[in-house]
Amino acid sequence: LPKMHGLRHAYAQDRFLELTGFPCPVMGGPHPSVLTPEQRLVDAEAREIISSELGHGREAITEAYLGR
């Protein structure tokens, strides 16, 4: 399963777009500094969901997949 990690990245990035309505930073999405308070909340919630779906216990791991 040599390409499995790449698939995890693609899943996380696609799922982020699905949950937030905007691409993640590594895919050219907005930098966190320009997000509205509502968008920041949506971003944080999406990262928690994705972290759980990927089997991780903390949101910080999503930085590797989505950027910050």
Image: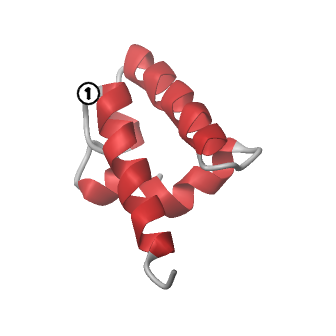
Residue 26 sits in which quadrant? bottom left
Q: Would you say 48 lies left or right of 10 here?
A: right
Q: Would you say 30 lies left or right of 53 here?
A: left
Vertical position of residue 24 compared to residue 48: above or below: below
- Observer-nearest of 30 and 3: 3
- Dot 1, how many residues are within 10 Å of its Cα: few (below 14), some (14-19), or many (20+)? few
Which residue is located at x 26 percent, y 46 percent?
Answer: 29
Vertical position of residue 57 compared to residue 61: above or below: above
x and y, in percent, of residue 23 in the image: 27, 42
Which residue is located at x 43 percent, y 50 percent?
Answer: 12
- Observer-nearest of 66 and 34: 66
Residue 57 sits in which quadrant? top right
Which residue is located at x 37 percent, y 27 percent?
Answer: 19
x and y, in percent, of residue 4 in the image: 48, 72
Q: Would you say 2 lies left or right of 39 here?
A: right
Vertical position of residue 14 compared to residue 64: above or below: above
* Residue to which mark 1 is pinned: 21
Q: Amino acid at mark 1?
A: Gly
Residue 27 sits in which quadrant? bottom left
Q: Would you say 17 lies left or right of 38 here?
A: left
